[in-house]
C-alpha cells in the first residue's frame, strides 16, 4: 500500500516537475541567447529544441489572433523567401506602432555580427496590443530574408521581447544607394569596436532607424536565425527596401572577425506556413 503511494507521488512529481523544468529551460535559453551571447552547448540545444515548440505556439496564437494550431508545418525556421503571390493580406494586423526613445547603449562585436544593445528603457513596439521591449539590433550581410527571390545587400534585425519572454523581430532590408542615417551616426564606433570589449556609445536613439513612409509589412511565425534557432519568433519584415552605402556594408563586414563576413543563414523551407501582409 505504502509502496503504491510512493509510486503515485513519484509519478505526480514527474508530471509536474518535467513541464516546469522545460518552461524554465525555455525561458533561460530564450533570454540568454539575445541578451548575453550565444548558447553553444549541443546538449542544451537539443534539450531546448524538444520542448520549445509546444510552449511557444499557444502564446503566439493568442498574440497574433491567428490559429497557428492549424499549422501542420514540421518546421518554423527562418529566414524564408517572401513571395508576394503567396501572401495573404490581413488589414486587422494593424499598423506597426513603435514608441522608441533615446537610451544608453553599447556596441558589441559578437564575432559573427555587430550588435547595439540598449541598457535602459528604449521602449517598445506593440503587436496586437502586447508590448515588446526593444533589446538590441544587429546587421546581416547579405540580407537573410529574400523578397520575391531577390537577396539584398543588408538586413537589420531589431530584437524585442515581451514580459512573457516571447521574441518579436522587426527586419529592414537594404540595397546599395544613399547612406543609412543610423549607420552614418554609428560609423566610427563600428569601425573601431574591439572584439574583446564592449564600447559605451552614450545615448542612442533607436528612433533614428527609419522604417520608411510605407506602412506595409510581412508577418509570419519563424525562428531565430543563429543557434539555438529558437522557434516561436514573430517576424515583421518592413516591405519597403531602404538604402545603405557600399562603404557602410563594408565596414560592418570588416568589423566581424570569425570568418562571418557573410553572416546570412540560408533560406529555410516554408512548409505550408502562412505569410501575411499588412495592409
Ligand atoms: Zn539577426
Image: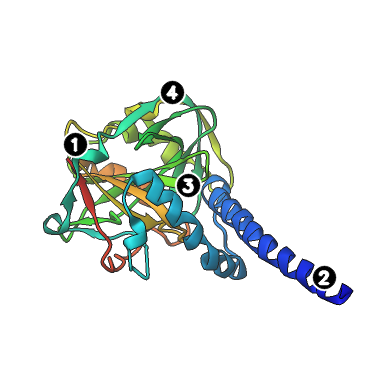
Image position, residue 158 (x, y; %): 38, 41
Q: CA distance from mark 4 to mark 1?
A: 24 Å
Q: Residue at x 33, y 28 (%)?
A: 208
State the residue at coordinates (16%, 61%): 149
Q: Nearer the observer, disc 3 or disc 4? A: 3
What secondary structure is found at the residue carrying circle 3? loop
Percent across and percent down for residue 146 are 22, 57
Badge 4 is on which residue? 102
Q: Reply above or below: 233 against 49.
A: above
Q: Earlier in the sequence, mark 4 or mark 1?
A: 4
Cα gap from disc 1 to disc 3, whole angstroms: 35 Å
Residue 161 relative to residue 244: left or right? right
Q: Which residue is mark 2?
A: 5
Along the polypeptide, which appears first: circle 1 or circle 3?
3
| Mark 2 in CB contact with mark 1 (< 8 angstroms) | no
Q: Which mark is residue 166?
A: 3
Earlier-in-chain disc, 3 versus 4: 4
- Image coordinates of residue 277 in percent, x first then y, are 20, 47
Query: Mark 4 and mark 3 in contact (Cβ < 8 Å)?
Result: no
> Residue 150 falls in which quadrant of the image?
bottom left
Q: Residues within 10 Å of mark 1 (few under 14, many from 20)?
A: few
Which of the pair 158/96 is nearer the observer?
96
Q: Nearer the viewer, mark 2 or mark 3?
A: 2
Amino acid at each position: 500500500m505504502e509502496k503504491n503511494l510512493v509510486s503515485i507521488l513519484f509519478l505526480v512529481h514527474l508530471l509536474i516537475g518535467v513541464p516546469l523544468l522545460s518552461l524554465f529551460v525555455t525561458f533561460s535559453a530564450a533570454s540568454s541567447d539575445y541578451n548575453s551571447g550565444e548558447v553553444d552547448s549541443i546538449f542544451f540545444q537539443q534539450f531546448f529544441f524538444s520542448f520549445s515548440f509546444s510552449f511557444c505556439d499557444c502564446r503566439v496564437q493568442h498574440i497574433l489572433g491567428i490559429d497557428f494550431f492549424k499549422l501542420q508545418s514540421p518546421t518554423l525556421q527562418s529566414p524564408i523567401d517572401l513571395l508576394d503571390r503567396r501572401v495573404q493580406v490581413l488589414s486587422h494586423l494593424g499598423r506597426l506602432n513603435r514608441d522608441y526613445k533615446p537610451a544608453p547603449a553599447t556596441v558589441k562585436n559578437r564575432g559573427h555580427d555587430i550588435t547595439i544593445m540598449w541598457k535602459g528603457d528604449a521602449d517598445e513596439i506593440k503587436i496586437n496590443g502586447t508590448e515588446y521591449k526593444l533589446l538590441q539590433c544587429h546587421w546581416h550581410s547579405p540580407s537573410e530574408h529574400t523578397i520575391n527571390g531577390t537577396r539584398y545587400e543588408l538586413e537589420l534585425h531589431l530584437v524585442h521581447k515581451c514580459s512573457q519572454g516571447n521574441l518579436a523581430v522587426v527586419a529592414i532590408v537594404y540595397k546599395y544607394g544613399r547612406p543609412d542615417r543610423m549607420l552614418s551616426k554609428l560609423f566610427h564606433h563600428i569601425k573601431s569596436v574591439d572584439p574583446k570589449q564592449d564600447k559605451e556609445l552614450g545615448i542612442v536613439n533607436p528612433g533614428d532607424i527609419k522604417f520608411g513612409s510605407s506602412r506595409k509589412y510581412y508577418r509570419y511565425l519563424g525562428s531565430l536565425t543563429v543557434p539555438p534557432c529558437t522557434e516561436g519568433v514573430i517576424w515583421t519584415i518592413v516591405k519597403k527596401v531602404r538604402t545603405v552605402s557600399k562603404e557602410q556594408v563594408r565596414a560592418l563586414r570588416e568589423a566581424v572577425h570569425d570568418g562571418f563576413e557573410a553572416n546570412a543563414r540560408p533560406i529555410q523551407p516554408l512548409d505550408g506556413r502562412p505569410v501575411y501582409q499588412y495592409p
